[in-house]
Structure formats: structure tokens, C-alpha cells
Image (cartoon, coloured by chain):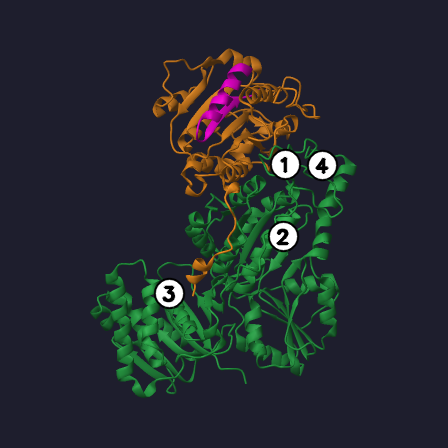
Chain colours: A green, B orange
Amino acid sequence: MPAPVFSIKIGGEAGQGVKSTGLTLARFAVRAGFNIYNYIEYPSLIRGGHNVMQINVSTDVVTGPFLKCDFLIALNQDTIDKHCGELVDGAGILFDADKEYNTSKIKSSIVLYPVPLSKIAKESGGKDLLSNTVALGATIGILGGNVDGLKTLIKQEFGDKESETIQANISALQTGYDYSIKNFAKQTKDVLRESNTLSSTIPQIVVNGNEAIALGAISAGMQFATIYPMSPISGILAILAQHQEEYGYIYKQPEDEISAINMAIGASFAGARSMVATSGGGFCLMTEGYGLAGMTETPLVIVEGMRGGPATGLPTWNEQGDLRMILHAHQGEFPKIILAAGDANETFDLTRQAFNLAEIYQTPVVVLIDRNICDNDQNFQIFGTSNYKIDRGKIIDGVNPNYCRYKLESDGISPRAFAGSGNFFIANSDEHDEVGYSTDESSTRNLQMQKRMQKLQTCMKDHMQGPKLYGPKDADLTIVSWGSNKGPILESLKNFPNVNYLHLTWISPFPTQEIASNLKKSRKLLNIECNYSTQMGGLIKEKTGIQISNNLLKYDGRPFFVEEITEKIKATLKGDPA
Amino acid sequence: MTLQELATPCSPTWCPGCGNMPIWAAFKNAAVAEGWDNTNTTLVAGIGCHSHIVSFTKVNSFEGLHGRALPVACGLKMSNHNLNVFVFTGDGDCFGEGGNHFIHSARRNHNLTVILHDNGLYALTTGQASPLTPHGAITKSTPQGNLDQPINPVALAITAGATFVARAYAGDIPKLTQIIIEANKHQGFSFIDVLQPCVTFNKQFTHQFFQDNTYQLDKSYDPTNKMAAYEKAHEFGLKQIPLGIFYQVEKPSYESQIPQIRKSPLVKVSIDRSNLSNLFKSYT
């Protein structure tokens, strides 16, 4: 039996501190020796609207969101109405005792924890704003946590704020905690008592994918980043902007995504390791520059955080609908390296790899992630830096009067020079000869096209990695998927020792043979994707000839919940029609 | 570099009498006079007749996309501010697809020299109206006369925040040479509107027209007076086209305000990030 997962949910209006409370609770749980996976839902609003965060806690690694809820912290009526139905028998619900909420919808099997949140908040000197902190203290009391650990964490989080603010928060926290201990002594749950698990002995960090991208880029020696704000990737720029002076790189906010990619190309031409990040809509504007980087053979890392499309679509929700766009964007043909990460840890690694690959192959490298990865926090062993070596690829030494920027080489990779190195060349968006002079002469065109496209062959040989297989080699059912679906799939697989999971991270070049051999071995196949038209399933068929007829698809912006995958696995194993 | 050393194996492909020829000549004269070469100077061009200049000039260059020369140049300059960066752009290139970049590059005051090849239409695509084509003009895309009012590039540059704004006539090579040198010396966004006859498609703005109707701003003109600059920018007519420096003020360039490149250009700053324990610690 896998270790149980306890799902706590906090809900309220945007502006009520749902996200910060949830993150504090998660970090507290990790420090107490637990693993967490946070799932957040929020609308594209700054005030009002409905925000929810789910904090999943377990002694085992936990990687996905659940439909069920074990403890609900309701900061408003809306949260009670929308989520009390998710509570399992014996679950608890905490709410403001003084707000006269309508609790008639709550089943009798649910334990009520009314706490005078706003009254305590006001007495602590923080008006209604501190209600979330009171609720946090009360929750820790009910769930058996150590309030001193929480106080230490709060002090660290508020490190740069005035002591009055810290004091008010500490007071709110303690009073909420004391209230629970006094009033709910017989209804406490032993959930957050400090635990001696692996995660309590190995230093852990709690990060989401946006943070992992930023940390990965800094670690990879990134020198220039230009990012136009857009959900769900704006978190990346906030971190990069903050640390630029300390680590000696430049973050620049451009006037639009067209400028972003062209600035990054200009920086890379000068010799700076460069990146952009955007979502699908911003990538549409970057499409022109995508091919410019390919044609001029300018290294560039592009992070694309997918959200629900088309057009403005579902700005703060998830989708994996941009795979085909990234694969086919831009007129004509040029070598594209496309990597898709499945969680924040992989995002950190693939971002770092992307910087090396971009410079080794002198072509754009896309790191494709989705909103769930961008926004959802998870704990991992603290990232290491010693296992990474910066590789800047082939760079010419000194000045060569006969230098050829686009010299024909059997591996497709010509020696690179930077602007101002003393070497003459034209980085040319027109088809060009070896120096870079424009030409439309037939044989030169053919040779330069072949040289550029050869890079993919070299990359397949030297760097491409196959898919990762989780679970037993021999299984009754093989699930194929990518991106953030990895989390709920692995979570569900804890209950199925006879099912394995093939996780795809290299999209271009495509590890056709390894994927095909894995799929051919399987007795049953199930493809899982967050889009309407099975974009990855189609790509697999195109490359391997294998048609996967069982599909679990979703395009409502929500992630796959663990229970949904479990249900689909059961049905597929039984042979029910898809 | 000498004029001979600046030559490439490519011969100019511009029409005989094209205004691009004297712009090219003036740039090369300035390069020889100032010692601009592959160690200290980089050229960035958009796409249009103007952009062919990089094929005929042996100075390291980036020939980008139509309308996008400026952002490439901004990224290049931020990454290596020791380089002299020249942007060659056309009036369609700069103010059609590139309009947004022009406004924002100017307001940020990047330390660039922007040379506008202003022939008043799209020439490489054989003569359609550009954002600078006069109202009523007959072109391939406006056979009934242009309904759009033209952009005033000098006034727009001043409004957007350029700190050096000048106009020159392509055919006056010595004066254009001098203005290119002065624009490059200026620390900030320098913009030169170069009036450039298109002998094939623009029958209105000919060499003769510019020779007859332009005059040099004299010594009494004060280029630090913004309102006077606007007034001069709106002077355009028979015998009434001013040339010279319309506007020049000192303001910190974008690059001079970036603390991380105060000691050395970005590309020379160490990228050893092997110790990130403090950064990671903030996520524990």
C-alpha cells in the first residue's frame, strides 16, 4: 500500500492570500519531513474571483493533484459552496465562525472547525487581512503541527518587512493555533507531526517550474534574457530581474515578443548566452525570429509555457496544445531542438542542457512546459551545480583573415565568431555562402541547407536522449505521455504494479527507434494528453507508424487528477472501450 | 582600415544614380576617418534596398528581418557596449513593420546610430507607398493617390525620446560623413534621416529636387531647444527643407545605466555560477 496523501485545500478571493498561505503551509510541511505537491487554480484577475490552492502532503513522494479533499480552509462562502462536495467522509472544514456562512450543504460526516478568524485577525492588529494567517495557525493546531516551526518560517519569509508586520503575523498565528488546541482538542488529526522520512534528512527545496527555469538559466551561465510578461511564465522574469546584478547577467523587458527574440538574437550574436520565455500567444509573435535564429545559426534558448488557447484562450489554465506549433512554426526548414519537461526538476535540468545544446548546434532550442509545471510547487532534493559543465561549442580562436562563419563541415557545425572579434562575416537572414554573402545560387543553397539540417543528425548521434520508462519493464499496460501529466500518472501508478509509463522529453529530434521498441513490447497502450487532437499521439504515429487507439484527453484547462487517471487505467485494463 | 580594405568581392547591385551609393560612400569615409573595423564596429541592417550595404562593406554585420534591425542592435549593444553599432534601415522597414521598435529603442536611449535610408517608398518591392510617402502620391499601391498622411520621422524621433536627431541629403557626401561621425560620438540614440532619391520609382524626390529645396541649419540655430526643433521638423516644402542637427541633448544612455556592465561589457563578465547555495537556500 502506498503511503496516504492528505489533501488540504485553501480557497478565497484573489487578494485574500490564498497562494502565500498555501505555499507557507507546504514549506512548513516539507521542513517537518513531508513531501508536498501544490496545485493552484486562479482566474486572470488581481482582486475578486475565486482562488484555490491544494496542498497534498505525504511521507512518500507526491506528484499530482487530487479531486478529493481531506481538509478545507474556506476563507469565503464561495469556497464552502464550490468545494464542500469534494470532502471525503471524516474530513474537516475550517471557516470564519463570525461570518454567518451558510453551511447547510456540508455533509454530516464532515467535521466543522469554526474559528473567529477576522476577530482574532483584528485583535492581532492586522484587520481582516490577517485572517489567512489565523487560519494557518488554527490548521497547524488541528493537524498536529509544531507552531514554533511555523513561526520560524514566517519570520524568515517576512525577513525584510517591518517588525510590526512580523509581530502581527506571529500573534495571529499563535492565537489561531491556541484557539484550535483549546476548542478542538478532541478533533485533532495527526497529519503534520514531524516525520523522519528521507526528505527530512536530505535538504529539500520547494519550487515551481518558473522558479526552476530561472534557477536553471542562472546556473547555466545565462547572460541575457528578454521576456515580455505573460501568464503563465511571468514568474520567470520576476526572479531573473531580481538577481541580475548579483550574478552579472542582463534581464530586459522588451516592447513586445518580436523585439524580445530579436534582442536575444542580437545578444547571442555578440557572444552572450541568451534566452527568451513566453506562452503560445507570445511565441506566435516570435515565430519570425525563431527561423531567423535558425538561418543565421545563432544560439538561443526559447522557453514556451503552454496555456489554454487559441487567442487569449484560458490565460491561467493548462493545455498542451502548442506541440505542433513549436514543431512546425516558421516558413521553410531549419534544425529545431525541442525538449519537453515533465516537472520542475526536469525543467531545471533541461533548461541547463538547452543552453549547451543551443551553443553546440548554433540553433534555437525550445524548452516546452505547460502551465501546471509553471505554477505548481513540488519539493525536490536541493538542486546541484557540480554536475553541470558549460559547453559553448565550436568557437574560433583569434583572428582569421579567411574566416568562414558558415564553413561547410561534415557535422553541420561551423566555427562561431562573436561580433567585434576582428573576424569579418555577415550573419545573414538571406541564404548565404560560407562567409555570409547573400546568394541564390543553386549549389550553395543546397550545400548550406544540407549543412544546417545535418545538425539534427549529429544531435541524434551525440546528444539525443531516449524516453524514460517508469515502472516494470514488462507490464500489462504502457501509458505514453509528456509534460505535467507525468506527475498524476506516476502518482496513480503507485497503485498499479503491472502498469508502466513511457515519459517523452525529446520531441525534436525524435528518438523514434527507442520509442517504437518500447511501444512494440507493450500489451496495451494508453496515450494521455491535454489537447483535443492527440498531438503527441499523432507525432508518434507519424514517426513510428504505431497508432495508439486508447486516449485520455482533456482540454478544459484543468490538469489530470490522480483519480481520473486511475479510473482510465482500470477501464483500459478491463478492455472497456475508450 | 583603408577604403580598399573596406571593399568586398560583391559589387553594388543598386540602380545607377541610386541614393544608396553616396550613403555607402559617406559611411566608408567616416569608417576610414574614425578607424571603425571588425574589432570595434558592427553593422545591423533590416531588409530592403538599403540592407545590401552590408554585402559591400567589409565590417562585421547582421542582416536581420524586415523591420527588426533595431531590437537586434539593442541586444548587441547591451551585450557589448564597447562596439560602435550602426543600424541601417529603410523608411518602410523602420516605420512600417519596425515602428514599435523605433519608438521604444528611442525612448530607452540605446547608444546606437540609426541611419534612415529615406526614399519615401518601398523600392525593393518595386515602388509601393511607405509610411513616409506624401499624401496624394501616386505609387503602385496607391494608383488613385495615397490616402494616408505620412509620418514625420524627425518629429517622431524627438517625441519618442531620441537624444540626437539630424537630417542629411544623401548626395552631399562630405556633410553626411561628418554627421555620421557626430552621431556616433553622441552617447545615446542618434537618428539621421537621410533624404535619398530613388531614381527608379520616386519621380518626385529626385537629386535635383533635394539640391534645389534643402538648406543647412545655420550656427544661430540652438539644437537643445526642443520646441524650435519641432518647428524645424515641420518645415518641409519648396526651398524649405532644413538639414543638419535638429535636436541634441545629453541624457544617460540605456547601457550607461546598467550596473552589471559598468566595469566591462556583458560578454566579458564571468559566467561561473558554480556556487548558487545562497540562491537555492531561499527556496528551502
Q: Identify the image quadrant of residue B141.
A: top right
The residue indicated by pointer 3 is A20
> Which mark is drawn over residue A434?
4
**Percent x, y of residue B125:** 64, 31
The residue indicated by pointer 2 is A357
> Between A324 and A299, which is closer to the camera in this rendering?
A299
Q: Amino acid at mark 4?
A: Glu
The magenta stretch spans residue A169 = no
Label 4 and label 3: CA atoms lie apart by 55 Å
Label 1 and label 4: CA atoms lie apart by 18 Å
Label 2 and label 1: CA atoms lie apart by 23 Å
> Which mark is drawn over residue A363?
none
Label 2 residue SS: helix
The chain letter for the residue carrying disc 4 is: A
To the question of a shared chain for discs 2 and 3, the answer is: yes
Q: Is residue A210 left or right of residue A512?
A: left
Q: Amino acid at mark 3?
A: Ser
Residue stretch in magenta:
B172-197
Label 2 and label 3: CA atoms lie apart by 36 Å
> Between A176 and A534, which is closer to the camera in this rendering?
A176
